[in-house]
Image (cartoon, rainbow, N blue to C red):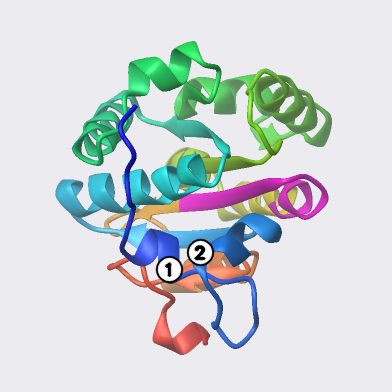
Amino acid sequence: MAETRVTGPALHGWSPRADGSGSGSDLEERPFHAVWVYDGVARHRSIVAAFLAAGFVAGSSALILATPEHTSEIMTGLRELSFSPDALRRSGRLTTRDASAVLEGIAVNGRPDPVRFTSFADGVLGSLAGSRGRVRIYSEIVDVVCERQSAASALALEALWDRYAATHAASVLCGHAAGSSTDHRGRQAICGHHSHVLAGDGLPHPAAR
């Protein structure tokens, strides 16, 4: 794989420090749990691909939990950054799962189950290889929950991701479609479960600083 220099908001804009300062390397030292409301396929592809690519450069592996259509777009975005998704898969550093299928597997009576969630996360992340044991996760599962179930279920799942990211070497980016059915109050509650709230361009939202 050719040496690649990844630039842009996904590498330089997200720091675990409260004041928003720091560098891309800081992100690999302390896991984070960010939320991003996206609008537009091209921007979605570029931002998520840059987020994952920054991890690959730092030695992390990656897990994508998204719709098949979005996963395909993200693979295109990685190729545009000179990464080979096929090579990353073969090396055990990239795994993808259908967000809807994962939700069905971790839900009990329509709500995310903590035991099933942990079993899934431990299993799939345990299969990933990484020189530093760190993983970057892009997930659209909560967005699927918002569309199909209740706001309470979405918040329950966000709480599970929050606890998992805090106790494992995993940095999570949750993607939410701008046109989803979640109302303003529900979206605010979801944002409250994240360490970072990102604007549409992938940079920290000014109101969250």
Amino acid residing under circle 2 = Gly
In-front residue for pair 59/161: 59
Q: Position of residue 88 (x, y in %)?
A: 44, 22
Disc 2, disc 1: CB below 8 Å?
A: yes
Q: Looking at the image, how many numbered discs can be counted on the residues?
A: 2
Question: Which mark is drawn over residue 24?
Answer: 2
Bounds of the magenta segment: 162-174
Compared with residue 11, is residue 195 higher up or lower down, i.e. above or below?
below
Disc 2 crowd, CA 10 A, few/some/many (<14, 14-19, 20+): some
Q: Quadrant of residue 13?
A: bottom left
Left or right position of 116 against 27: right
Residue corresponding to mark 1 = 12
Under circle 1, the secondary element is helix
Mark 2 vs mark 1, CA separation in Å = 5 Å
Q: Quadrant of residue 190?
A: bottom right
Under circle 2, the secondary element is helix
Question: Which mark is drawn over residue 122?
Answer: none
